[in-house]
Amino acid sequence: MQCHPLPVRAPRFLFTLLAAAVLAGCSIFPPGPDAPVARRAAALLPADALILGEQHDAAEHQAIERETVEALANQGKLAALLLEMAEEGSSTARLDRTATEAQVQAALGWNDKAWPWRSYGPAVMAAVSAGVPVIGANMPRARMKNAMADVSLDVQLNGEAYTAQQDAVREGHCKLLPEPQIVPMTRIQVGRDRAMAQAIVKARQPGKTVLLISGAGHATKVLGVPQHLPTDVSVKTVRLQAGNSPEADEENKGAYDAVWRTPALPSKDYCAGMRAPA
């Protein structure tokens, strides 16, 4: 049942409907940014898939991801936890819910240097202890070289979206990537999105929700994973955003079903380490 806020000057008879809806358990007003994570997630469901697009260095985003796993698992609605942080082909499906962290990391082929376990382990272990499979969804590094030469990936997005994806690749590499590398690197990005979409399709279960944790760029509806899902797969996307800015607000328009904001992080020049010394 989907509900909508009443207008400020609602006719008197509508308040009877309002009371009835509340008694029926319907949330009339959409949950605000301070609402519990479970309530915010519930407002987006039902859906076959829910994608949380994080900022990788925001610890509060990983805390939200753990809370989302717990909320869905406690309701028996979590079909699987999919991760950008682990490669396709890895899974905890054969592990018992009492598996140790070391066993889980081994099953997922975890790369702690790329993805610190202290950040993602709590969400992963919450799923494992609930008996929910954790599945690697990212394209394996071994396939990336082939993806760079795969011209079929150039037509997975429409022309405008593909151009925007190329621009995102430029920005993501601090505008330091040689221009001949833009197309091959864009193919990798598109290939990764397609791999994660395929993982969602494989993991979905009727009446449950597949939760994918990824970077915000993979979660966008206009360029990312949702573009590669079949039309019969319902998906909701959330951007987990640290702080706020007019630029981010512009990026968010039409790209996500919801934006969950967290406190701003200290200012950081992410490109400093990529620039050659002066």
Image: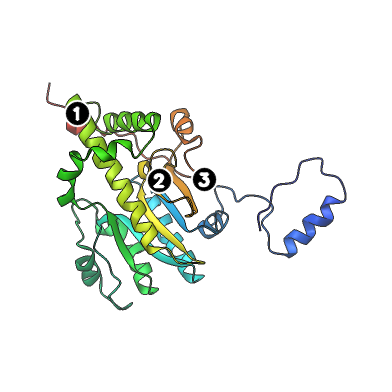
Q: Name the residue under label 1.
A: 177
Q: Mark 2 points at which residue?
A: 219
- Where is residue 126? Give x, y as percent: 37, 68
Q: Do the residues under discs 1 and 2 have CB atoms within 8 angstroms?
A: no
Measure the C-alpha gap from mark 1 to mark 2: 23 Å
Q: Which residue lies furthest to the top in this view?
A: 278
- Where is residue 22? Give x, y as percent: 73, 60
Q: Quarter holding the C terminus? A: top left
Of helix, strand and loop, which one carries label 1? loop
Q: Name the residue under label 3.
A: 258
Camera-side residue of 57 and 93: 93
Q: Which of marks 2 and 3 is nearer the N terminus?
A: 2
Q: What residue type is labelled 1?
A: Leu
Q: Which amino acid does label 3 sit on?
A: Ala
Q: Is residue 113 left or right of residue 55?
A: left
Q: Which of marks 2 and 3 is in front?
A: 2
Q: Earlier in the sequence, mark 1 or mark 3?
A: 1
